Image: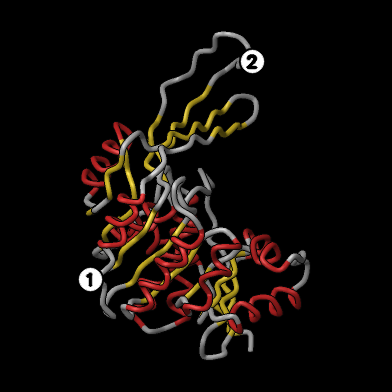
Amino acid sequence: MYYTITLNPAVDMLTKSEDFMLGKLNRTAEAVYVVGGKGINISILLNNIGKATKALGFVAGFTGYYIKKELERIGVISDFVETAGNTRINIKLTTRTETEINGQSSEVSESDIEKFFNKLNNLTKEDTVFLSGNIIKGMNTDDFIKIAELVSKNEAKLVVDSNKDLVLETLKFQPFIVKPNEFELGEMFGVEIDSEEKLFTYAKKLMTLGAKNVLVSKGSKGATLFTESGDIYSVDIAKGKVVSTVAAGDSMLAMFVAKYDETNSYEEALKYASAAGGATSFSAGVGSKELIEELVKQLTVTKIN
């Protein structure tokens, strides 16, 4: 089973206003509401390609109810801890420019956190856990590390995708893969990744710290994969009209893990990962299996070494 953990999910409200003015009454066009959070995005992609997945984390109030119902509607199983208060709403407002206003969820209690950890006790080596995004108010870094430790203790496959500090703190538990972009990779070590030489140096440094595989996304330049076996691969990107890049990285990571489990091939996993990132970028939401299969025909994987 693929488990995804989204500790701080959200409902994203996407809307437009023609002539927005601060301090005045403004009217917006009809809003679109989208369930958000890195782990949730991963569960949606896995569900789209027919893989069994269960979304874990915290939800609260009417917004939490909406998240559960939306996932149920599209066929994603969830087992969230329900807490007091409300899950946050993020506003994505398009005017002459794009403005984002991210809300804050209600704080979780020690009892809520204990209930969440209890849901991880039955993990086995047959399971994969995607530990994604940031912690929610009421949790701390030690709680995030404890999740990674518990996954590792139960011999489940661990995949981590979070901010630089949390990723670095969990490398000692040897995650199967981490997926920074070039900027995030540089941020982890306080450098600017402005050359292939630096990209290779610091990706490999993540591996010496514990990551088994490292996938570095490079935007329009594709992605580079550093593997546990010592091989390095690069992949280009598919062509298409970009609708939104939200969740593209999550889709890429989810597809890589699922396709590698299916084929045991780094080349196939990388090719499909790039196609999944493209499919989501070219869609209003997470990409479909049909579009991924179409885009993968465009892509070429090259072995660098």
Picture residue at 58% right of the left edge, 81% below the top: 207
Dot 1, how many residues are within 10 Å of its Cα: few (below 14), some (14-19), or many (20+)? few
Q: Nearer the viewer, residue 194 or 263?
A: 194
Which colour assignment does the render follow? Answer: secondary structure
Between 113 and 189, the residue placed more toward the observer is 113
Question: Mark 1 = which residue?
Answer: 122
Q: Please state which of the two labelled residues, at mark 1 or mark 2, is closer to the viewer.
A: 1
- Going by the image, does 97 lie left or right of 150? right
For residue 22, which numbered disc appears in the image? Answer: 2
Picture residue at 51% right of the left edge, 69% below the top = 299
Residue 241, image x, y percentages: 53, 47
Looking at the rendered structure, the secondary structure element under dot 1 is loop
Residue for point 37% across, 76% down: 157
Residue 67, position as x, y percentages in the image: 30, 41
Kindly report the distance in space between the C-alpha atoms of the residues bearing marks 1 and 2.
51 Å
Please tell me how crowded label 2 is: few (under 14), some (14-19), or many (20+) other residues with Cα within 10 Å: few
Most foreground residue, 154 or 130 = 154
Q: Are marks 1 and 2 in contact (CB under 8 Å)?
A: no
| Image quadrant occupied by the N terminus | bottom left
Which residue is at the far top?
25
Quadrant in the rendering for residue 184: bottom right
Q: Secondary structure at mark 2?
A: loop
- Relative to 113, say whether 205 is above or below: below
What type is the residue that disc 2 sits on?
Leu
Classify residue 158 by image quadrant: bottom left
What residue is at 45 percent from the left and 52 percent from the top?
139
